[in-house]
Amino acid sequence: MPVTFTFGEMLSARSVIGSTLAELGETHENLWVITPDIGATLVEFRDKYPDRFLDVGLAEQVSVGISAGLAYDGNIPVVSGMLPFLSMRALEQVRTDVCYPNLPVKIIGTHGGLVGNGGSTHYAVEDLSLMCSLTNMTVTSIGDPVMVGEIIRQSMSMTGPIYIRLAVGKKDKVLYEPGEHDVRIGKGIVARDGDEVTLFTHGTTVAQALDVADELANEGRSVRVVDMFTLKPIDEDLIAQCADETGGRFVVLEDHLAYGGLATRIADVVADRGIHLSAFERLGIPQVYAGFGEDEQLRDKHGYGHDATVAAVRRALAAS
């Protein structure tokens, strides 16, 4: 069974954002970067292009509103901040100022899921559900820090808005070799092939899913891991293909509320296309405010850590 991923060095996704934007600023003279007081990793862009950098302070609604105005004037605005506040405090501005006129605003942020040990007010756990519900919004959740740069580059040519979700972004595991996968917005990645069950995931839990597939491979079980990093538009053809090729057995793992995120998106495709499944397990945050703790501890506590994922995959494998 071929393994199509490698775990590499640890890398800061935030530093990738900063260096990529500074690089793109040279070729895109209409690129602006706006931050609500979260600009420590944007210093390179700020120093090179001070006239196209704005720190509005702790005012996420203002950062989105200014970005919409800049986009109306023919610019490409990037808003970089913390997603709990960009997705919720500024939701009305994102919906009405950005999505309604379908403007090319890029919203890039950290603290997607139960990461950062900031408590429930500082976790973005409803964000994917909210963003996927918005007309015209493209929604992504990135686990590999190197991919962040590629997605930002691709987004430069988009005519509408995009939401790019990251974890804390300070120390992230490189999951893929450069050029190993065809990374395209709107297409999932088969991170590891397998033919008995498909384990769908995104963002912070991709590494965990790969570890689970490794453990079960040692028992002779064949688990396909799909990094569905674009939730909207979702790769419907890949979902149908996986149902056909892995016995109609699906497990969905995500660092988001169990309902409203990727599992719900996949369930909608299954229902709309009339795809037959023999097993469907969803693992994510239950309807609780998760409290404090390290992310791995919180996943274990709330039933979607490593061991719970192994158990869910085993249940799916036992389905006929």
Image (cartoon, helix red, strand yellow):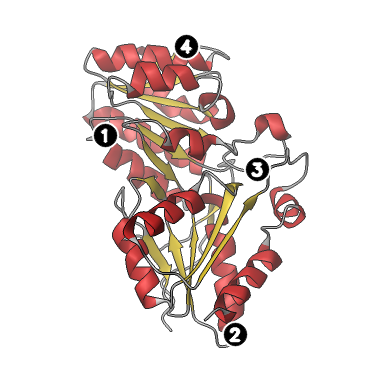
Amino acid residing under circle 2: Asn
Q: Earlier in the sequence, mark 4 or mark 3?
A: 4
The answer to whether the residue labelled 1 contacts the one labelled 2, judged by CB atoms less than 8 Å apart, is no
In x, y percent, where is residue 106?
Answer: 36, 29
- Kindly report the distance in space between the C-alpha atoms of the residues bearing marks 4 and 1: 22 Å
Q: Nearer the viewer, residue 83 or 286?
A: 286
Q: Nearer the viewer, residue 29 or 94?
A: 94
Q: Earlier in the sequence, mark 2 or mark 3?
A: 3
Other-residue count near label 3 (Cα within 10 Å), few / some / many at <14 / 14–19 / ≥20? many
Q: Nearer the viewer, mark 4 or mark 1?
A: 4
Amino acid residing under circle 4: Val
- Kindly report the distance in space between the C-alpha atoms of the residues bearing marks 4 and 3: 25 Å
Q: Which residue is mark 1?
A: 156
Q: Which residue is mark 4?
A: 62
Amino acid residing under circle 3: Val
Q: Residue sitting at 46 percent across and 48 percent down?
A: 142
Q: Earlier in the sequence, mark 1 or mark 2?
A: 1
Q: Residue sitting at 28 percent across and 19 percent down?
A: 101
Vertically, is 211 above or below 19?
below
Q: Which residue is mark 2?
A: 218
The answer to whether the residue labelled 2 contacts the one labelled 3, judged by CB atoms less than 8 Å apart, is no
Q: Residue sitting at 23 percent across and 27 percent down?
A: 28
Vertically, is 105 above or below 316?
above
The answer to whether the residue labelled 4 contacts the one labelled 3, judged by CB atoms less than 8 Å apart, is no
Q: Earlier in the sequence, mark 4 or mark 1?
A: 4
Other-residue count near label 4 (Cα within 10 Å), few / some / many at <14 / 14–19 / ≥20? some
In x, y percent, where is residue 4?
Answer: 41, 72
- Kindly report the distance in space between the C-alpha atoms of the residues bearing marks 4 and 2: 52 Å
Q: Which residue is mark 3?
A: 115
